[in-house]
Amino acid sequence: MESSFLTAVFLPLALFAVMLGMGLGLRVDDFTRVLVYPKAVVVGLLAQLVMLPILGFMLASVLPLTPELAVGVMILAACPGGPTSNLITYLAQGNVALSITLTAISSLITVITIPLVVNLAMGAFLGESTTLNLPIGETVIQIAVITIIPVAIGMALHQFLPQFAAQVERGVKWLSLGLLGLIIAGLLVQQRQNVVGFFAQVGLVTLALNLAAMALGYLVARVAQLDRPSATAITVEVGIQNGTLAIAIASAPTLLNQPNLAIPAAIYSLLMFATGGGFAWWVTRRGSRAQTPIG
């Protein structure tokens, strides 16, 4: 499928804005905070980078999906975290510092893990005869360029121009949200002949991935006997994926260049705001009830 103006121009801009916005809120301390929360960080990263792809593979294998959409689900499962998870953690009164640390560290590690997971998924669902692949070395460099560089720029602005960074951070996040909305709309229009079928097929599996991943995050956090704010942060970090990055991996001309593989991430990106917001509302309501004096 030939690349469109949408995937060639708007998608890189959206991803740059998303990662720049994340960098504007990061400090070097966010990467070294693993020393402060060692167990929580290890538990969260294990759930994000190992358990989540396994969960995605199980759902993609069990539920009725075409091979292409199954690969799309795996691309989504390989892209954890993102700035949205930090916002939802804040709204849910979770450990925001832990959330930011997990997002920061996973954004570095997934530069390597994404091509590994995606190539394994394409081999499993599309078969060995498929011509699609992500060359490991080349893909690592490309993902690093589109993620780490804008994060580094944002962090530099935060460090050397803190007032300017604080002023533009909210605007950049709204810009990235608007661009993501345009991309999702464009992808759905581009696939309009199949969009109803895609929703029927992918809506259930992406919702299941979202909810099951949140349940997984909460379960491993409680098994590890983490406090409630940390458990909330890990629940959100595992359950909320970086939909913009997943769309970029699937449809960017320099990567897979297959917009149909981005459909699960596009539909998921619509659902995650509802489920994430619902989770934040439920947690804060539950917390307020627990603090209400009796009698």
Image: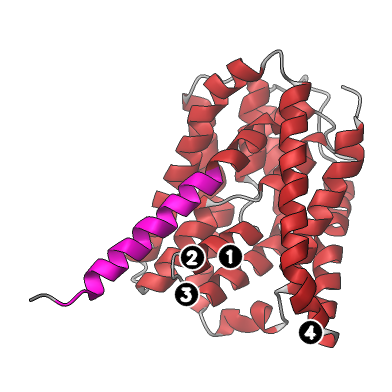
Can you tell which of label 3 and label 1 is closer to the viewer?
A: 1
Q: For residue 104, what is the image quadrant?
A: bottom right
| Residue 156 pos. (x, y %) | 84, 79
Which secondary structure lies at badge 1?
helix
Side of 169 where 243 appears, left or right = left
Which secondary structure lies at badge 3?
helix
| Residue 15 pos. (x, y %) | 79, 52
Q: Residues within 10 Å of mark 3 (few under 14, many from 20)?
A: some
Q: Residues within 10 Å of mark 4 (few under 14, many from 20)?
A: few
For marks 3 and 4, give the CA distance. 34 Å
In this orientation, does residue 112 appear?
Answer: no
The colour scheme of the drawn protein is secondary structure
Q: N-terminal of the two: label 3 or label 4?
A: 3
Q: N-terminal of the two: label 2 or label 3?
A: 3
Point 83% across, 56% down: residue: 16
Point 84% across, 58% down: residue: 144
Can you tell which mark lies on residue 120?
none
**Residue bearing mark 4:** 163
Pick the residue in front: 57 or 248: 248
Side of 53 where 92 appears, left or right = left
**Residue bearing mark 3:** 39
Can you tell which mark lies on residue 91?
2
Can you tell which of label 3 and label 4 is closer to the viewer?
A: 4
Amino acid type, residue under disc 1 in the picture: Asn
**Residue bearing mark 1:** 86
For marks 4 and 2, give the CA distance. 24 Å
Can you tell which of label 4 and label 1 is closer to the viewer?
A: 4
Highlighted magenta segment, given as a residue range: 272-293
Q: N-terminal of the two: label 4 or label 2?
A: 2
> Is residue 193 on the magenta stretch?
no
For marks 4 and 1, give the CA distance. 21 Å
> Is residue 292 on the magenta stretch?
yes
